[in-house]
Image: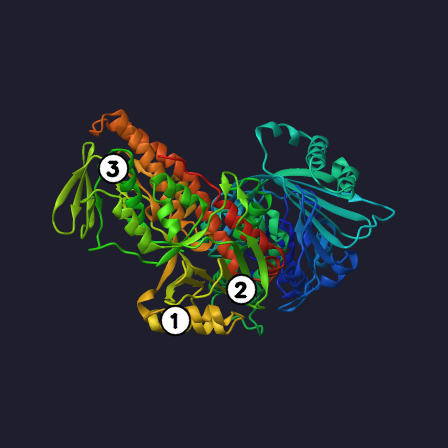
């Protein structure tokens, strides 16, 4: 391309994959010419096939290719999910049921057939093969592209569809994709005389892997196998033959039917490949530059994701259509009028595209990661913005003086104990911590033990999942109660020596004096300490001193309340959850007379008035719930709540990536509770994790003081103890924050595909996962 060419022809797309060819064809349909650069000498169809859902067919219909692809591929009628541990059917779903925009449509599309179909619709010469970009430079509004063969191209618009190792994404400054810790093998089996399989998507989950098979047409069957590699798996990816034997060996060691094994066995070596699964951290896309000036990215260059939703290829087709529409209208105008300056229109068009695709990409990446996390988990714990700063401080102080023989002082900014949030779900892991502190039985005596969790669809009113909470865990039976926060705080306080808590004492600044920390308080006084533990919540002064980044807004808000029934409420020993319609709500009895409730949602600009007062917020929540299929008994709980027993706040969390690199401890200073791991409330683990923190911290620190004679003079021992605590809690915190955030995505998403998956077969898995994640033991003091 020469600089003198018309602007409508000065579009260079890097990569002839699904996103690149879809964008090129979309622009062609808008009357805009583009040039596609492909590094390979011909079209590449790595991956063999991919599940193509409704959203992808809508994109293909927009491009004029939908019917052509339909004729070449079978429509999958049902989804069957089986346990690879027992061989039993976990879930069966009809994949042709009605969706928001019409009946569902799912086919397994051969990638090579789709790429060829896209190529055939493009003008001759649109794709330039064996053209690999090695660098990008700027010359005003022109991008200068240096190619591997020494040639140079000048482009007024540069679109990077160049995959997971995108040169364009790197130029934009996007974070490198992260390794998920899992790998995937894929293959295609060809049956010239017909395979005879039903049009069914068959999946196997458990035993540490996820596998599946589904027919593309009468002759081809696609299969996949994803797993978490161990050290013993080294060398299996050296050849397709080794990989095939490995997959067959794993499947034969589980309850997978022979018909599935036969598909893999029949695959030719040339039709088997394996690769590590990578994804772009969804949090990195929140503020990243998807588009800058006249440059943007699409497809895997934008949103590499794990394959657990089957949305990688589908979203790439979406990208292509949206990008072609935004850029095409910017260049030729909706009615053919060009309007303002060309570069401004290009920039505005790409900015519009980025705005549309940013949150869609974040949602899909996060949801895919969570689904895989749930489906492949063999571990009981794998991996509510809950304000527990004082609770966690009490745990540490209760542990140190009373149980480990070490004296400490708790500074609390309020004039008395605070119990904001009213109550919190206390899972098995939290009761193990409370037992370590010697107060578990006191809490049990005053709170009901749950027997089951029922999750309802807010759209239909039907039960999407019923999970028994009496199941056995790794270390004994599960135990879940909703604990009143004020009762727990008072119980912890009563176990402390008198004078341990100093109220109305707010820290405003921290300084260092050798190995001693100097604390400046709001009342003008100062205090010196050899050990400083920050349990001061989401806006922690101590966390700020350690350099941890501020928690970020999740985009959602939560309202919580407590209803009192002096004569008894009549609810059974069960957790009631309602999900869908853009919100997540729950009703949980604490004891015979108190019922806790919560409601989380995505506020719009129109909702701001509701947040002005408690009365307006309660009315807002009731209106939303009445418009959904929520039983009258649940509505009565909210109606009965006094104004003083309702609170609302935005949900914030600390980016888990910040904790990977951040300082949880430094010298004689560390953080715990919400000062360490503020998280969204979907797992109900904010308060539980804070109790874990307190026990682990007290154990590590208590041992250091015990070894040093209790005078605290051994600074290196203290430093090592806090470092040990930090490492013990770092990955637990990262896992909980991440899992909570992405589970929230699934539960509150209104996306058609996510909603369909959630309502048909993910709800039971999510409910069981909440229980499994609490099967964790922080140990004793």
Looking at the picture, tell me which residue is in the foreground, 649 or 509: 649
Instruction: Point out the tag, 3 or 1, that comes first from the N-terminus.
Output: 3
Question: In this rendering, would 571 be left or right of 94?
Answer: left
Instruction: Point out the tag, 2 or 1, that comes first from the N-terminus.
Output: 2
Characterize the local packing of mark 2: few (<14), some (14-19) or many (20 or more) Cα atoms within 10 angstroms: many
Label annotation for residue 580: 2
Characterize the local packing of mark 3: few (<14), some (14-19) or many (20 or more) Cα atoms within 10 angstroms: some
Dot 2: element: strand
- The quarter of the image holding the C terminus is top left
Confirm or deny contact between disc 3 and disc 1 (CB under 8 A): no
Instruction: Point out the tag, 3 or 2, that comes first from the N-terminus.
Output: 3
Residue lying furthest front in this view? 567
Label annotation for residue 401: 3
Q: Position of residue 621 (x, y in %)?
A: 43, 70
Looking at the picture, tell me which residue is in the foreground, 106 or 466: 466
- The residues tagged by marks 3 and 1 sit, at their Cα atoms, a distance apart of 42 Å
């Amino acid at each position: 391309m020469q600089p003198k060419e018309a602007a409508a022809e000065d579009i260079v797309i890097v990569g002839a994959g699904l996103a690149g060819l879809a964008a090129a064809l979309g622009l062609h349909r808008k009357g805009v010419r583009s040039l596609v650069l492909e590094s390979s000498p011909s079209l590449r169809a790595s991956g063999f096939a991919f599940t193509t859902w409704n959203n992808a067919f809508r994109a293909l219909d927009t491009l004029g290719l939908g019917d052509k692809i339909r004729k070449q591929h079978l429509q999958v009628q049902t989804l069957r999910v089986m346990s690879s541990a027992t061989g039993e059917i976990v879930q069966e779903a009809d994949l042709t049921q009605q969706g928001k925009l019409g009946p569902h449509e799912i086919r397994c599309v051969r990638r090579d057939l789709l790429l060829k179909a896209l190529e055939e619709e493009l003008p001759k010469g649109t794709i330039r093969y064996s053209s690999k970009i090695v660098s990008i430079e700027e010359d005003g509004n022109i991008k200068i592209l240096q190619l591997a063969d020494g040639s140079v191209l000048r482009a007024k618009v540069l679109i990077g569809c160049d995959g997971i190792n995108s040169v364009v994404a790197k130029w934009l400054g996007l974070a490198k994709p992260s390794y998920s810790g899992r790998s995937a093998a894929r293959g295609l089996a060809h049956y010239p005389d017909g395979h005879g399989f039903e049009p069914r998507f068959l999946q196997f989950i458990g035993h540490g892997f996820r596998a599946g098979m589904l027919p593309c047409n009468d002759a081809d069957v696609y299969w996949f196998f994803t797993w978490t590699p161990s050290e013993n798996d080294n060398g299996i990816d050296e050849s397709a033959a080794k990989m095939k034997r490995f997959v067959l060996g794993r499947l034969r060691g589980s309850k997978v039917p022979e018909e599935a094994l036969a598909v893999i066995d029949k695959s030719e070596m040339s039709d088997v490949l394996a690769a590590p699964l990578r994804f772009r951290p969804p949090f990195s896309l929140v503020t990243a530059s998807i588009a800058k000036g006249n440059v943007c990215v699409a497809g895997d260059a934008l949103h590499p994701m794990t394959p657990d939703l089957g949305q990688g290829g589908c979203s790439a087709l979406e990208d292509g259509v949206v990008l072609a529409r935004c850029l095409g209208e910017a260049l030729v105008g909706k009615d053919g009028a060009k309007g303002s300056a060309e570069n401004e229109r290009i920039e505005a068009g790409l900015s519009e595209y980025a705005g549309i695709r940013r949150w869609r990409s974040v949602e899909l990446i996060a949801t895919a990661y969570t689904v895989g996390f749930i489906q492949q988990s063999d571990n009981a714990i794998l991996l509510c913005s809950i304000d527990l700063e004082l609770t966690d401080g009490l745990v540490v102080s209760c542990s140190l003086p009373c149980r480990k023989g070490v004296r400490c002082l708790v500074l609390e900014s309020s004039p008395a104990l605070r119990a904001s949030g009213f109550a919190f779900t206390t899972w098995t892991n939290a009761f193990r911590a409370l037992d370590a502190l010697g107060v578990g039985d006191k809490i049990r005596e005053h709170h009901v033990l749950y027997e089951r969790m029922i999750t309802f669809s807010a759209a239909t009113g039907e039960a999407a999942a019923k999970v028994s909470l009496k199941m056995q865990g790794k270390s004994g039976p599960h135990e879940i109660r909703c604990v009143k926060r004020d009762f727990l705080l008072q119980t912890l306080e009563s176990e402390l020596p008198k004078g341990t808590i100093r109220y109305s004492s707010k820290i405003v600044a921290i300084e260092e004096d050798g190995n001693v920390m100097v604390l400046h308080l709001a009342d003008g006084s100062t205090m010196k300490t050899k050990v400083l533990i920050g349990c001061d919540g989401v806006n922690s002064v101590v966390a700020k001193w350690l350099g941890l980044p501020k928690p970020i807004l999740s985009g959602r808000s939560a309202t919580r309340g407590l209803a009192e029934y002096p004569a008894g409420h009549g609810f059974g020993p069960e957790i009631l959850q309602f999900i869908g319609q853009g919100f997540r709500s729950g009703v949980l009895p604490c004891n015979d007379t108190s019922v806790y409730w919560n409601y989380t949602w995505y506020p719009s600009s129109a909702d701001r008035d509701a947040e002005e007062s408690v009365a307006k917020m309660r009315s807002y929540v009731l209106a939303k719930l009445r418009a959904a299929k929520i039983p009258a008994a649940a509505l009565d709980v909210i109606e009965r709540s006094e104004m003083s027993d309702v609170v609302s706040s935005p949900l914030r969390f600390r980016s888990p990536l910040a904790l990977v690199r951040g300082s949880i401890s430094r010298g004689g200073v560390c953080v715990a509770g919400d000062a360490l791991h503020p998280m969204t409330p979907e797992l109900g683990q904010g308060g539980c994790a804070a109790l874990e923190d307190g026990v682990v911290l007290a154990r590590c620190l208590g041992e250091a003081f015990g070894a040093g004679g209790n005078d605290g003079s051994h600074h290196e021992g203290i430093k090592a103890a806090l470092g040990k605590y930090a490492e013990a809690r770092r990955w637990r915190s990262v896992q909980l924050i991440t899992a909570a955030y992405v589970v929230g995505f699934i539960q509150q998403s209104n996306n058609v595909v996510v909603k369909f998956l959630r309502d048909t077969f993910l709800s039971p898995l999510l409910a069981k996962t909440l229980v499994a994640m609490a099967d964790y033991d922080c140990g004793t003091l």
